[in-house]
Amino acid sequence: MAKLIFLKDKKTVGTILYRSFVGILTIIKIMSTNKTLTMIKPTAYKNNCAGKIIEKIYEGGFHIAAMKLTKLSKEDAQKFYEVHAGRPFYDELVDFMSSGPIIAAVLEKENAVEEYRNLIGATNPAEAADGTIRKMCGTNIGENAVHGSDSDENAEIESNFFFSGRERY
Ligand code: CMP
């Protein structure tokens, strides 16, 4: 009898462990593949390009989970772009990104990072394909209309940089 209960418990524990594992995998998948962080950069905002960019985002099938008009301090911009610290364009990038209002947004779609990078086009607007956001609204490689996360890991970090859980829908 005791042996039977032990076996049953073992089965129950196995089921719980299996379900937890599947649950964790599902959470990791939701966290990792469906989200990207964008900023509409100061020049694009100043040139009234935000409306056109948001339209492109919707046309691209993204859900806007969070969005705000804000302005980065110099320290904010340094922190956001700290992966580029030491590169020749870093100081210019920080000065530019803290020079005026920006719109930050969390976008959701399956495979969001890659899909959004396709939608925005090459870093340098001069090399961006026709129909992309950077081609449409970018000025030069620094003032290239929008930022898009370059990995799932950075999408998570960058989304948390701007938004709390209560600001996402
Ligand atoms: P973004 O997607 O915001 O990520 C880093 C930014 O650095 C990039 O867009 C460009 O605006 C900027 N950047 C990258 N390379 C250069 C460069 N060679 N000169 C100036 N700015 C650059």
Image (cartoon, rainbow, N blue to C red):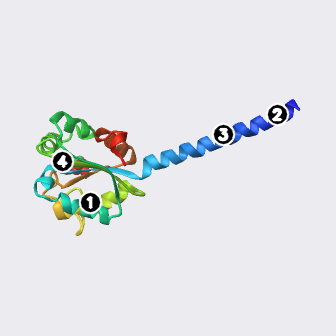
Viewer-nearest of labels 4 and 1?
4
In this orientation, does residue 16 appear?
yes
Residue named by callout 2: 5
The crowd level at tag 3 (other Cα within 10 Å; few <14, some 14-19, many 20+) is few
- Give the CA separation, mark 4 to mark 3: 46 Å
Q: CA distance from mark 4 to mark 1?
A: 16 Å
Q: Nearer the viewer, residue 84 or 149?
A: 149
Pointer 3 or 2: first along the chain = 2
Mark 1 — residue? 120
How many dots with numbers? Answer: 4
Q: Position of residue 104 (x, y in %)?
A: 25, 48
Q: Which tag, 4 or 1, sits closer to the chain's start?
A: 4
Q: Position of residue 10 (x, y in %)?
A: 75, 36
Quarter the N terminus occupies: top right
Disc 1 marks which amino acid?
Ile
Judged from this view, the residue extending furthest toward the right is 1
Q: Earlier in the sequence, mark 4 or mark 3?
A: 3
Q: Cα distance, mark 2 to mark 4? A: 62 Å
| Residue 102, numbered label | 4
| Residue behind mark 3 | 16
